[in-house]
């Protein structure tokens, strides 16, 4: 059975990533890209679906950490004979992907074991394995693997195993390399040199951060996670490196998040720019423009790493699912949904980019104008909403608010940056949307906005209304909505998206879920704007406290069992953390103020 989600660590090379368990087992690793078939898929199945374990014969992990300023994982193991540390990392990509594992004796003498189960296509394909010039190779179809190092290996059935002993100061290394099977074996890398180069690269990158407020270590880890989840060739940032980790144990809310969501656009841009990473923000904006280019009526909510549009959703019946959570899905059918809020996210991201001094080109503006033409005829329509529901389309209040944001930001761009457009017409539409939302999305009896028109359900996405500037935080309707969310959606002090236990007719799913961590960060942001600073700080501290020992956050959390849920680590959660940290800091430009009041 797979470890608890919080027991995993992330390593990556800015093209793909792997999850390393506390027990020394790599249970997830797609090659050569984030969205490729996984070579190690035990996370969603059994060890027979692929894994790579390097650990003491008998022992346990004492502690683990990332080496300062890096994504190089150090795990300290204690065994009956002594102690050993294992360093796991992926050198930043310069050619083919590599995973390097270095074991070093610390105390006494420790017997180490290696178990390497190589599979392709999410654990379905067993490769042909052979020894070739002191290199272990595995080939099947388009995929090739070579394993090099100074650890003796032998075959046992369909598994490769090995043992070795370590005394203080002794090191053994293994390098796992994926390559296209039709090509020659890639050039070998030297593990110690690769370690030094990888440490230097990450430390140099971390050294560019200009955040110096509270919880700096956690903010820095979050920014490094965002960098690790960046697909370097294009600048796109995936929502998570994993697929089908459940939002509830044994449930069916299992989705593939290895793609780029437009919904993350503004938060991503703000987090990167406020952190001092203007180059990454510029490349994210450029990815965004390329992805959405084309027919504005065919705007998608998510795209592939290079802007691919067809992300066909499939189920993999040969995988048992994470701790029995089925079905296992790859691809994501939500790319075919209509979600009006993404128009607002794109126009807001473009506006914020101009405020930060990037992206005032005419081509980008022409694209925005065309998007607004499409939205002008679409905003009246029902949609699937921010949560990508698989039930009937509705007039979701948040979707209409974000349609308002799209026109509002276009107006601001025209007025503040002398961009040309039909501003009077945009103002008319903006006012029309605002009037309709306040009339149909507000429940006067309960004094709260609701999830969708003419229905009583609440939705945590309503917290975005003051954050994006739709209404001032002093408006009594905002205060009433916050009170209603506190009364109905708080669970053990954290915010649920909505009441999923009675919402099958909304989202088409019949299983519950945990609390959605970004929503709790939004509540903290609203508290800051309302002047409830102590409550905001307490909530933020509790949220930070949910991170695992490496400061990594998942998408959701079960406060009753203390377990992480959903894909991991989740960019949306880390983005929200960074932005809330800036809101709470003494920085002169707070992210919430920038977005809602610019």
Image (tube, grey):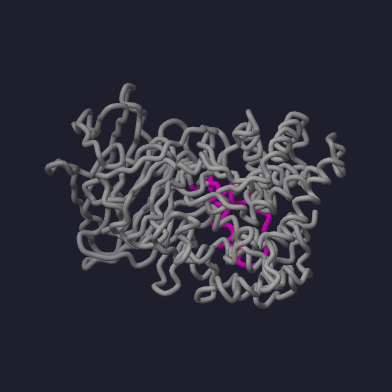
Q: Position of residue 430 (x, y in %)?
A: 78, 48
* Residue 378 horizontal side relative to residue 594, left or right: left
Apparent side of residue 230 relative to residue 321 in the rendered image (left or right): right
Image quarter hosting the N terminus = bottom left
Residue 468, percent from left and from top: 72, 56
Say whether residue 555 is visible: yes
In this view, 351 is above or below 294: below
Q: Residue furthest left?
A: 157
Q: Quadrant of residue 522?
A: bottom right
Range drawn in magenta: 199-227
Give the x, y percent position of residue 341: 64, 48
| Quadrant in which residue 425 is drawn | top right
Q: Residue at x 87, y 38 (%)?
A: 418
Taking depth in this image into account, of 416 and 335 the one nearest to the observer is: 335
- The number of callouts visible is 0
| Magenta stretch: helix, strand or loop mostly | helix
């Amino acid at each position: 059975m797979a470890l608890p989600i919080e027991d995993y660590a992330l390593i990556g090379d800015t093209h793909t990533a792997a999850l390393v368990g506390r027990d020394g087992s790599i249970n997830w690793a797609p090659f050569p890209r984030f969205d490729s078939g996984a070579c190690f898929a035990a996370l969603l199945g059994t060890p027979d679906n692929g894994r790579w374990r390097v650990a003491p014969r008998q022992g346990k992990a004492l502690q683990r950490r990332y080496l300062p300023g890096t994504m190089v994982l150090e795990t300290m193991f204690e065994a009956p004979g002594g102690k050993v540390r294992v360093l796991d990392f992926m050198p930043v990509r310069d050619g083919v992907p590599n995973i390097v594992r270095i074991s070093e004796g610390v105390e006494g003498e420790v017997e180490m074991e290696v178990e390497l189960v190589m599979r392709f296509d999410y654990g379905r394909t067993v490769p042909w394995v052979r020894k070739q010039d002191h290199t272990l190779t595995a080939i099947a179809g388009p995929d090739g693997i070579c394993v090099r190092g100074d650890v003796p290996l032998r075959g046992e059935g369909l598994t490769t195993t090995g043992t070795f002993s370590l005394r203080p100061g002794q090191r053994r290394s293994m390098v796992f390399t994926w390559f296209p099977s039709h090509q020659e074996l890639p050039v070998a890398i030297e593990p110690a040199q690769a370690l030094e180069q990888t440490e230097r690269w990450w430390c140099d990158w971390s050294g560019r951060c200009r955040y110096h407020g509270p919880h700096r270590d956690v903010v820095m880890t979050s920014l490094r996670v965002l960098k690790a989840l960046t697909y370097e060739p294009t600048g796109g940032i995936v929502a998570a490196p994993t697929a089908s980790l459940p939002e509830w144990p044994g449930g069916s809310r299992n989705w593939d998040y290895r793609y780029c969501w437009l919904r993350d656009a503004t938060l991503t841009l703000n987090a990167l720019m406020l952190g001092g990473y203007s180059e990454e923000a510029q490349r994210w904006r450029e990815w965004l423009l390329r992805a959405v280019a084309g027919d504005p009526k065919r705007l998608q909510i998510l795209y592939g790493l290079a802007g691919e549009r067809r992300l066909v959703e499939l189920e993999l019946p040969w995988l048992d699912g994470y701790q029995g959570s089925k079905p296992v899905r790859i691809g994501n059918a939500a790319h075919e949904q209509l979600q009006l809020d993404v128009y607002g996210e794109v126009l807001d991201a473009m506006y914020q980019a101009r405020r930060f001094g990037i992206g005032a080109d005419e081509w980008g503006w022409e694209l925005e104008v065309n998007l607004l033409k499409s939205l002008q005829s679409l905003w009246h329509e029902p949609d699937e909403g921010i949560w990508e529901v698989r039930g009937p389309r509705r007039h979701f209040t948040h979707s209409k608010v974000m349609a308002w944001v799209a026109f509002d930001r276009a107006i601001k761009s025209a007025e503040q940056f002398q961009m040309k457009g039909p501003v009077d017409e945009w103002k008319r539409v903006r006012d029309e949307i605002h009037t309709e939302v306040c009339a149909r999305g507000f429940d006067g009896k309960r004094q709260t906005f609701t999830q969708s028109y003419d229905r009583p359900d609440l939705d945590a996405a309503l917290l975005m209304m003051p954050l994006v500037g739709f209404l001032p935080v002093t408006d009594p309707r905002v205060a009433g909505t916050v009170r209603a969310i506190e009364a109905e959606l708080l669970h053990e002090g954290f915010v649920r998206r909505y009441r999923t236990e009675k919402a099958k007719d909304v989202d088409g799913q019949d299983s519950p879920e945990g609390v959605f961590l970004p929503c709790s960060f939004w509540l903290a942001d609203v508290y800051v704007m309302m002047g409830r600073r102590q409550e905001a700080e307490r909530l933020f501290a509790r949220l930070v406290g949910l991170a695992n020992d490496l400061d990594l956050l998942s998408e959701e959390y079960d406060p009753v069992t203390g377990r992480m849920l959903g894909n991991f680590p989740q960019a949306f959660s880390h983005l929200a953390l960074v932005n809330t940290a800036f809101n709470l800091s003494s920085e002169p430009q707070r992210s919430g103020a920038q977005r809602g009041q610019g």
